[in-house]
Image: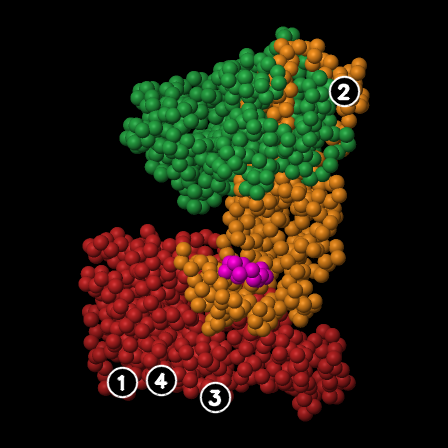
Chain colours: A red, B orange, C green
Amino acid sequence: MTAKPKIVVGLGTCGIAAGGREVYKAIEKALTDNSIDAELTQTGCIGACENEVLVDIVKPGQPRISYGKVTEEKIGEVITNHLLNDKIDREFALGKIGEGELPAEYDDLPNFFVDLPFYEKQVRLCLRNCGFINPEVIDEYVERDGYEALKKVITEMKPEEVVDVVKKSGLRGRGGGGFSTGLKWEFTMKAVGDKKYVVCNADEGDPGAFMDRSILEGDPHSVMEGMAIAGYAVGADEGYVYCRAEYPLAVKRLKLAIEQAKEKNLLGENIMGTDFSFDLKVKEGAGAFVCGEETALLMSIEGKRGMPRPRPPFPANEGLFAKPTCLNNVETFANVPVVILDGPDKFASIGTEGSKGTKVFALTGSINRTGLAEVPMGITLKEVVFDVAGGIIDDGKFKAVQAGGPSGGCIPEDLLHLPIDYDSLTGAGAMMGSGGLVVMGEDTCMVDIARYFLTFTQSESCGKCTPCREGTKRMLEILQRIVAGEGEPEDIEKLKTLGEAIKDTALCGLGQTAPNPVLTTLRYFQDEYEKHIFDKRCVAGICVDLMVYLIDAELCNGCGRCRKACPVGAVSGEKKELHTIDTETCIKCGVCVEKCKQEAISLQS
Amino acid sequence: MTKLNVTINGLPVEAEAGMTILEAAELAGIDIPTFCHDPQLVGAGACRICIVEVENARNLPASCVTPIWDGMVINTESDRAVQARKANLSLLLANHPLDCLTCEKSGACSLQDYCYKYGVSETDYVGEGKDYAVEDSNPFYERDMNKCILCGKCARVCHEINGAGAIDYAFRGFTSTISPAFGEPVENSPCVFCGMCTDICPVGALTPKLSKGKGRVWEINKVKTICPYCGTGCAIDLHVKGNEIVGASGNREGLANKGHVCVKGHYGWDFVHSPDRLTKPLIKKDGKFEEASWDEALSLVADKFKAAGAEGLAGLSSARCTNEDNYLFQKLLRMMGSNSVDHCARL
Amino acid sequence: MTNSIDEVENADCLLISGSNTTEAHPVIGYRVRKALKNGAKLIVIEPRRIELADYADVFVQIKPGTNEAIFNGLLHVIIKEDLYDKEFVAERTEGFEEVKAAVEKYTPEYVAEITGANAEDIVEAARIYAAADKASVLYTMGITQHSSGTNNVLAIANLVMATGNIGRESTGMNPLRGQNNVQGACDMGALPVVFTGYQPVVDPAANEKFSKAWGVSLNDKPGLTVTEIFKGAKDGTVKAVYIMGENPMISDADLNHLEESLDKLEFLVVQDIFLTETAQYADVVLPACTFAEKDGTFVNTERRVQKVNKAIGPIGESKADWEIIMALANKLGIDWNYGSAEDVFKEITSLTPSYAGITYQRLEEEEGIQWPCPTEDHPGTKFLHQGKFSRGLGKFHPIEHQPPAESPDEDYPFILTTGRNLYHYHTASMTGRSKGIKEFSFEDTLRINPEDAAALGVADGDMVKVASRRGEIQVKAEITDTVGKGVVFMTFHFSDSPVNKLTNCVIDPIAKIPELKVSAVKVEKVAEMAAK
C-alpha cells in the first residue's frame, strides 16, 4: 500500500491513440497547480480499449477507481475532485478494483472485473498484470510474483520436470497451429546440438489482432520469464524476440525490460547465482506478414529474406542458424509462469478436454465493446460476441464473425453455439489463429470481406510457391470481377477448385490457409455470391459497382446543385423540376450526394 | 543404412531412410515432374508440381522435400494429385508468354513438357500477366523475367554452388521476381557470369546470347570434352550443330567440376570460329607472310631443322595442347638429338 | 595437387597463399566458398586483398616476395607453442631439428618486420592452421614465380609436414595448376631433363628404355630450359626453334630481351591456332586445330587424366598438333604411322609406369583417372603420400628468407606484381577472340593504393606510364585499397599493355621460374610527362 495516492494512466498503444499522453500531461499540470503529492505512473492496456483513455486513481486505504473515456480537458477536475474532495465523478467512473473503504454514497459503484459485462466472463491469466503494473518498472512485475516461476524452475526443478509440467498442463501454442507446447519443448530438449535457441514469435500481423502487442506493451517480463524457463528446459542459453518494427512501443518496453532484468541478474550470466545463463535479444521484423510463419521468421533473424522452407526438419531439430530451436508465440510464453506457479492441474482445470487454459481475443468490428478479452477455452462464440463484446452496434443484426485472421474463416450465426477451442473452430473451416475476432453485422458484404482478406494474403504472399503466389492472385481477380458486377456463373466453381488446390499444395501454413476466407464464405454465404453474379446485386450495399445513385422524386426540389457538380454530366433536369441520373454515364463519385441539401440522392442496390 | 519399405503407385519399393519421396520414386523408375528440384541444391519445395498423394496425409506433400517413412503409401498420379498438378500448371501458364515458336528453350522446356504430358493447353485463369523489360545489357546472357516461373534454381545455384549470391527473390506475392539487389542489371551485381543459372533454368527465362538463334535443341548434338582454360579440368558439353559450335554448358558427369563452370568455360568457346583462325600454312617471304601448301611448309621446316643440327635445335611444347601432342613433340625433338624441349609450365 | 578438388570442401582449414582462387580457378573457388559454408576456417596470405580475403578468419597482407619468411614464421609459432604433430614428425619425416633451429629466429615480430604483416595475425594464423584436423594449403604462381620459388614451396612443405597435414583426405599441399594441360605437358616429358613420367634423360636405364622403344640412340645430356633457349638464340648457339601453342612474346618475362632473341634467331616455326604476337616473328607458321577439333587427353591439377573429344572437323586446312608433328617427322625421314590420338596414348602408357593402367576406354567409363595408375585394375590415386612419401621419409629443408632480386629504391619505388583476372586466360589469344568476354573485359588497369595515387597526383582512370629497368608501358590507373602501399598490380593478358615488358627474367636456380611476381617499377602520370 502506498502512502501517497497513485494515479495510473493507460499508456498502451490504445491509450496513447486515444490521447493518453495529453491526459498524462494534464494530470501532471493538475497535480502541480493544486500542489497535490501523488505518484503518477503508467500502465499497459487493461483490455477495455473502447474506454480509453483510462485513468485509475488509488487513494491509500481505498479501492482503486477506474475512470474511462477521460479527456485532457476534464481530467484535472476528476483528479482534484477525487483526491482533494473524495468525490468520484460518476460521468467517467467505470468501477472499483480491490479492497478498501469508500464513502457510502459510492457503494453502488460496480466492481470492475466482476460487475462490468465486458469482464464478467473473462479469466485473466496472461493478462494478469496488464493494466496494473508499470511495464517500464521491473519491481512492479517482481512484486506480483514476477520471476518466482523462473526461480522455482532453476533452483528446484530438472529440465525434464519442467517439460513434464508444461506437457501435463495441456498448454498448446497460442499462435495458430495449436501444437502441444510441452511436446515442442521435449523435442527441442532431446534434439542434439552444441547450441540451442529459444525464439518468441512476436510478429503479430493479422489485421485486427493486437493480443501480443498488448501483452508486450503491458507486461513484457511475463514473456521474457516464459522464455527463460523454456531456455532452461530445452538447454538453450540464448533467445530472440522477433517483434515487428510496427510495434515501436512494444520494442522499446521489451528492450528496457531486458536491460532491467539483466541488471537484476534475472537474465544474463549465471541467473540468480545458478549455472543457468540466458541472454535475450530483440530482433525487429521489417513488416512482412509471412515472417510470422516460423521458418520464415527464423530466416529473417538469420538476415535472409523471410521465406518459409519445407518442414521437416522442424525448428526443434534444425531451427535458428540450423540449431535446435524452441519457438513459441508471445501469449504461449506469457502463460508459462502461470503454469509453473499455479501448477499444471490448476491450469488444466480451465478449458475443455483438448484445449486448456484461456485464450486472449482482440475484439473488433461492428460490436459495442471492442478491446482485448481473455476468456476460458470452451466458452461459446455467442458468449464472446454478445456477452463480452456486447453485441452488434446500434442493435444491428449479427451476420458473421471472422476468426483467425486472413488464415481463418467466417463463421455464420447458426454456428455461434460452437465452443471456442482449437478443434471446433478448425472443423468450421476457420481456426483459432492468433486470436483476432472481427464481428460483422448485416451491412457487411461477405464477398467483399473475402476479397479484402485475399487482397491482404496476396500482397503478403512471399512469392516462393506457385499456388500461393499465382493462385491467390487469380482468386482475387475472380472476386474483384464478382464485386464489380462482372462475375460469371462458373466463377464459384473456379474459386472452389482453386481454393482447394491451394489448400492442398501450398508450401507453408499461410499459403495453405489463404483460401479460407473465400472457402468459408462460399460455404456459409454462397447465396450472396450468387446474388452478385446472377442478379448483380449486393444486398449489404457495399459493392459500389453493383449500386446506382438514384434521386428521390419526393425530396428533389430541382435546385440543380447536383447537375452542376457532376463531373461527367450524368445528371439532367430542368430548373425546379425533378432531376435524374443517367446510371450508364455516372461514375459513382458521390459528389452529387455531398452537394444535395435535400438529402434526395442515395446509393441503391 | 536403414531400409524403409514404401509403396509407390502400388509398387513395393525398398529405399533408404532419409530419402525423399522423389528419390524413392527415382529408385523405382517412377518419374515425378519437378521444376525447382535439383539434386545438387538444397530442397526448396517451391514449385509444388511434384506434389503427390500420401495415404493419411492432410494435404498433398511435395515429393522433393518430404522424407519417406516406413510403410508410406504414395500415389504420384492419383486423381487428386493430377488435378492439383494441373491446377498449378494452369496457374504457371496463365503468367507465362506463349511464344514457344520463337523461344530458345522450346524442346527443352520443362513447362512445355509437363503441359504436354498433362494436356494443359491453355489456362483456366486469365488475368494480369508479368510485364518486365527483357534485360540484355550484359554480353553473356539475356534475362526475360516474363518467362520466369520462380522455381528459384538460378538464385540457389548462385548462392549455393557459385557463392556469389548475385540474385535472389525480390518483392512479394504476385510481383515476386528474381533480381539482383535494387533491381540493378546483373553486371552491377556480384554476378561473375558463370552462367550456371542459364544451364539450370527449366524454362526460357535465361538465354545465353552467343547461342541465340543458332539452332533448335533437337538439332544440337552435345559433345562432352574438357574446358581448354585453367587447370581445374572442367568437363563441359560443346553444343554442336553441323560443323559449328553454338554453345557450351557444364557436364555434371565430370568429377573435377560436377557440372560447375565459370565464365570462360561457359562463354569462351567462340574463338574456335574466329575469322582470325589460321587456316593455311604461312611462309614469311621478304618480311611478309604468304600462304603455302602443307608440303611446302613442312619441307622448309624439315630442311631448317636438319641444318640447325641437334645442338642448334630447340622446341617449346605447350601446356594447352594434349598429352598426345606433347608426347610426339618431345619425342620428335629428342629423336633429332635435342633435349632442349620445354614449355611454359612456369608461367 | 597432392589431394583432389573434391576434398577441398571437407577441409577444416584452408590456407590460401599466392592464389587468387576465385578468379584464376573459379570452379575451385566455388568449392572454397562451400568449405567455408561447411564451417572451414580460412587463412589468406596475399599481397592483395583478394575476394577470399573478405571471407577469411585471418587475412595476412604481405609484401610481395616475402613468402618463405611468413611460412617460417607460422612454423616458428607452431613449434614454440608446441602445436606440431610429434608423432607424424617422428615417424614419417627427417630433418625436423635443423628446421626447428632455422625457424628459431623467425619470431612473429621479426617476420612482421620483413613481410609488413601484423605479428598478431601471424600468431592467429599459425594457431588456426595447427588446430585443424584437416588443413589444406592451396597455392599457385604467387608462391612459385619468385627467384626463391623453390624455397617458398619447401617452406610450405615444412609447415605441412610439421602439422601432419599430408597423406590424408582434405589435407595436403595443393598447387592449383594454371593451364588446362600444364600437368600433362610435364607428365609427357616436355621438359629438358625428363622423359614421360619424370624419367630422367640422364638415367641410363630410362635412356636405354626410350632409345630402344623409339629406335634411336638418345641424347643423355639435359637440354636447355626456355630461358636458356632464348639466351642461346641471342648468342647464336640455338639456331632453329619450334614453338607449339605458346605465346612467349606476351607471357614471358622481360619481353624486350626476348624480342632481341627472336630477332637473332635463324629460323622460327610457330604452330598455333592464331597468328599470335610470337607467330609474327616466325619464318613458318603452321595452322593447328583447337581443342574442339581433336581427340586426346588433358591432365588437370589433381592429376586427373581426362578425355578430350573432337566436336567438329578442322577449320580450314588446320590439323591436330600431333598430326602436324607426325607429318613433319615423316618429312624428316622418321617413319611414324599413328592412326589416331589413341594410338599415341597407347605408346605413352607403355613407356610411362604412372600411366600404365590408363586406357581411353577407362577414361570414358570412369570420368578420368588420377595418376599414379600403374595397372588396369588400379583405381587411380585420389591423394598422394598416404602412409609413405615417394622418397620414403618426408624431408624437412631449413629455409632462409632471401629478398627478391629487385627491391624498390629511389628510382623505382614500387613493387609491381602480376596475375590474372576472371575473364581472361593467359595471353588472351583465345579469350581475346571471344565476343562476350572481349566486350566485357577489354583493357587492363594498374591497381594502385589510394595513398600512393594521391602522392603521385593520379586520379582513377588517368593514363600512367609504368617503367622498370627493362621497359615501359602505358595503362590506366585504377585506385583501390586492395593493394597495399608501395605495391601495384597488373594482369598479363593484354597485348596493348604488355606488363611483361617490365618484369624481371631473373630465375629461381632450381625450378628456373622467372621472378614475375616482383619487379621494381616507377609510375608517372602521362599528362604530367607531356607537360614536362
Q: Position of residue B249 (x, y in %)?
A: 63, 44
- Residue shown at the point (51%, 42%) measured from the top left: C30
Q: Are marks 2 and 3 in contact (CB under 8 Å)?
A: no
* Chain designation of label 1: A
Across and down, in percent, residue C51 comes to 50, 37
Residues B3 and A216: in front is: B3
Q: Which residue is mark 4?
A: A117
Cβ atoms at labels 4 and 3 below 8 Å apart:
no
Q: Are marks 1 and 4 on the same chain?
A: yes
Q: How many marks?
A: 4
CA–CA distance in space, label 4 to label 2: 110 Å
CA gap between label 1 and label 4 equals 19 Å
Distance from the alpha carbon under mark 3 to that under mark 1: 42 Å
The vertical placement of A550 against C389, above or below, is below
The answer as to whether the residues below labels 2 and 1 share one chain is no
Q: Quadrant of residue C26?
A: top right
Question: Type of residue at label 3?
Answer: Asp
